[in-house]
Image (spheres, helix red, strand yellow):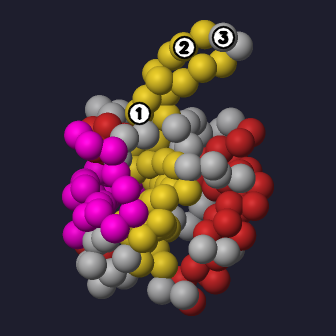
Amino acid sequence: MAQLKEGMQAPPFEGTDQNGKLIRLSDYSGKKVILYFYPKDNTPGCTAEACNLRDNYNSFLKKGFAVIGVSMDSEKSHKNFAGKYSLPFPLIADTSKKILNDYGVWREKKLYGKSFLGVARTTFIIDEKGIIETIISKVETKTHSEQIFGI
């Protein structure tokens, strides 16, 4: 798949969240969506990002945004993570990596000179018609909401 760019149609997706509920992008037609991809539940950066989004969740709702997180962790892991940190938004368990691949965030990464495949922390702001408005690829985990509001 070609790399996604701002102004393109967001790829449709569906997956189950931490409560076993089926979540589809089409469910959010007419709403703005903050679709954020993160590497792993219960890690320092991912926890900081999720908690920052949680702390600003009501502000997102007031501005007409829905928030959806996606990682390759299981529903059970997401349920634990969401419960532990009182996360009020769905976390999709993309264990097959289909959504990660469709959005181009499953890619080669480097750490300490070693290459490996992993999730590139990325946020997509999708408008009411399913068009990608903004792509944030340099996510600041502790101040991510401010990045989003500053768009």
Q: Which residue is mark 2?
A: 115
Q: Which residue is mark 3?
A: 113
Query: Can residue 86 be seen here?
Result: no
**Residue occupying the point 25% across, 64% down:** 9
* Residue 76 within the magenta-colored segment of the rendering: no
Q: Give the structural element (helix, strand or loop) at label 2.
A: strand
User: Can you give x and y, in whole percent of width and height, for residue 25 in the image?
Assistant: 28, 65
Between tags 1 and 3, which lies in front? 3
Mark closer to the chain start, 2 or 1: 1
- Marks 1/3: CA distance? 19 Å
- Local packing at callout 3 (Cα closer than 10 Å; few below 14, some 14-19, many 20+) is few
The count of marks equals 3
The three-letter code of the residue at mark 3 reads: Gly
**Residue occupying the point 58% across, 79% down:** 60
* Residue 5 within the magenta-colored segment of the rendering: yes
The three-letter code of the residue at mark 1 reads: Trp
User: Can you give x and y, in whole percent of width and height, for residue 53 in the image?
Assistant: 64, 64
The three-letter code of the residue at mark 2 reads: Ser
Q: Is residue 145 above or below residue 46?
A: below
**Residue occupying the point 33% across, 45% down:** 3
Tell me whether the residue at label 1 lies in contact with that at label 3, contact meaning CB atoms closer than 8 angstroms: no
Mark number for residue 106? Answer: 1
What is the magenta range? 1-26
Q: Give the structural element (helix, strand or loop) at label 3.
A: loop
In the rendered structure, the answer to whether residue 107 lies left or right of residue 62 reads: left
Mark closer to the chain start, 1 or 3: 1
In the rendered structure, the answer to whether residue 43 lies left or right of residue 79 reads: right
